[in-house]
Each structure stands twice: as C-alpha cells, then as structure tokens.
Image (cartoon, rainbow, N blue to C red):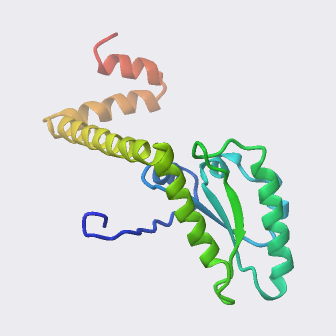
Amino acid sequence: CEAAGYDVILIETVGVGQSETVVRGMVDYFMLLVLTGAGDELQGMKKGIMELADGIVVHKADGDNLRLAKKTVREYRQLLHFLQPASPGWTTTSLPVSSIANTGLEDVWKTILTFQETMEESGAWKGRRHSQTKDWFHSMINDRLIDTFFAEPGKIEEVAELEKGLLEGGWTVTSAGERWFGEQ
C-alpha cells in the first residue's frame, strides 16, 4: 500500500494477542480501540496489549454512553501512568470518540500527527522504520529457508517420522530436535 502511494494505511487486527504483537512491529502508530464500560475489564486486561499502544480510543462516547465513556477514558489514563510507554519520549493517552456524534476523531488525528512529529524530532521514527525494514527482511529469509528446506526430497517425511516418535512418547522435543540435527 505504501509503495502504491498511500500516506495513511490502517491495519485492523482480530484482537487475539499474537497478531497485535506482529502488527506492532509493522506500524508507526499503534492504537488500541476499546468500548465504553470497560472499567471492570480493566483490572483483568492483560497489560501486554496496553504496553504496545501509543494511543487508546474509547469508542461509542455518545448518548447514554457518554458519561460512562468519559469515566473509561479517565480509568485508562490512570492505568497508563503505571505502564512503560510503547514509544520512547511519548506519553500514551486515551481519548473518547463517537462515530454517531462525529466527535473526537479530530483529536485522535491531531494526536497521531503530534506523535509523528515527536518521534521524527527524536529520531525514533527513523529508528522504528529501520527496525521494520530489518524485521521484514529477516522474515523473508526465514520463510525462504523453510520453503527451501521442505522442498528437498524426503524432508517432509523425515519430519513426519520425528513427529510420530515425539507424539508416541518415544522422544522429547529436545531429543527429537537433536536427532534431526544429528546431535544424538
């Protein structure tokens, strides 16, 4: 998308944990979208996803939810004081947004632009982009090595045989790995 000339690209995850970690390494700004009334869930929420976030948006801040949304924003702001920021030199915050009332979106966009400016001034933006490029490169190498490995005749069968021994209890994961690499 970037090569096609798009300046802004939004990536949405399914919210299962691991995908967020992968996406965090791909994006410049990581936003956590939450709903109003999450107060009770805050205590049980994994801090991991919040430590990835550069900003938290509390959605559905309208109508009967407005009071509750403002309370949720305050709770997240309080909680964020106890977490290490996702990006150096940046303070993660939470903002209320309503798509129905069309409120808060400008504040979110201004926050993203301020984030970009802050990160560019500190050099963190360029550093993150370099890390993204290196991670992508390493991922391509790993994928190619695995594809090349399994393209060799007999490799799939050899791995299947080791898996069978492993699952039948004949070997531990370590011993199967050692057998594979000829260390046993």
Is residue 105 found left or right of 169 in the rendered image? right
| Relative height, residue 86 to residue 179 (above, below) | below
Residue drawn at point x = 56 percent, y = 71 percent? 109
Residue drawn at point x = 60 percent, y = 65 percent? 111
Residue drawn at point x = 46 percent, y = 65 percent? 11
Outermost residue on the front side: it is: 121
Which quadrant does the C terminus fall into?
Answer: top left
Is residue 145 found left or right of 87 in the rendered image? left
Outermost residue on the top side: it is: 184
Camera-side residue of 19 and 62: 62
Q: Quadrant of residue 8?
A: bottom left
Outermost residue on the left side: it is: 153
Camera-side residue of 163 and 24: 24
* Residue 136 seen by the camera: yes
Camera-side residue of 60 and 117: 117
Residue 69 x %, y % = 80, 74
* Residue 29 seen by the camera: no
Q: Quadrant of residue 96?
A: bottom right
Q: How many marks?
A: 0
Residue 61 x %, y % = 75, 79
Which quadrant does the N terminus fall into?
Answer: bottom left
| Relative height, residue 49 to residue 139 (above, below) | below
Residue drawn at point x = 64 percent, y = 87 percent? 102
Residue 88 x %, y % = 58, 42
